[in-house]
Amino acid sequence: MAFREGLVRRCDWPGCPNTFQADTGPSERGWIWPRPLGMDVLLCPTHAKAGHLPKTWIIRTDNHPKVLVCCTCTWEADEPDSTRGAAVNRWQRHTQLENSGNRW
């Protein structure tokens, strides 16, 4: 089967090269999409077990909802973001710092 760029799903863990074709699904079990926790993040089997699943809370202030991201490791962002994409980026920076030995 030919590789089709538009159907590629990637692990959202920073720097992870794991992918699969969306139309055929992953070849290995354990990929997760922890949407009940509020984030549109896809994690491969390795990173699904890393102890860093993102969670979000929607904060409504002055009719402008904000997204506060936190992590199952107990880390929490110091301020909310205006979009889910920005919240995902903040969580990804958190995972990079945690894995480099630095802490927020």
Image (tube, rainbow, N blue to C red):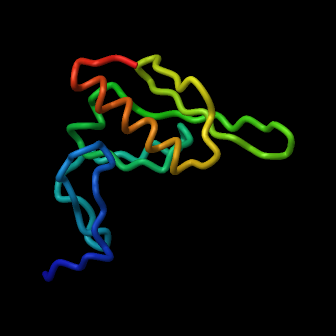
Asked whether 61 or 28 is in front, the reply is 61
| Image quadrant where one finds the N terminus | bottom left
Q: Image check: 92 left or right of 84?
A: left
In-image side of 3 versus 43 (left or right): left
- Looking at the image, residue 4 sits to the left or right of residue 54; the answer is left
Give the residue furthest to the right.
62
At x 19% / y 53%, what residue is drawn?
18
In the depicted structure, whether residue 3 falls above or below residue 79: below
Which corner quadrant holds the C terminus?
top left
Instruction: Pinpoint residue 95: horizontal percent, then vertical percent.
Output: 33, 31
Quadrant of res 60? top right
**Residue most extreme to the left:** 1
Q: Provide residue 22's location: percent of width, then percent of height.
A: 31, 68
Residue 51, image quadrant: top left
Which of 60 and 104 lies nearest the eye of the viewer?
Answer: 104
**Residue at 30 percent of width and 26 percent of height:** 97
Could you say where residue 89 lies in the image, as x and y percent from the top left? 44, 43
Q: Is residue 97 above or below residue 48?
A: above
Figure disc tally: 0
Q: Position of residue 56 (x, y in %)?
A: 58, 35
Q: Is residue 34 above or below residue 80?
A: below
Q: Residue at x 44, y 24 (%)?
A: 72
Residue 48 in which image quadrant: top left
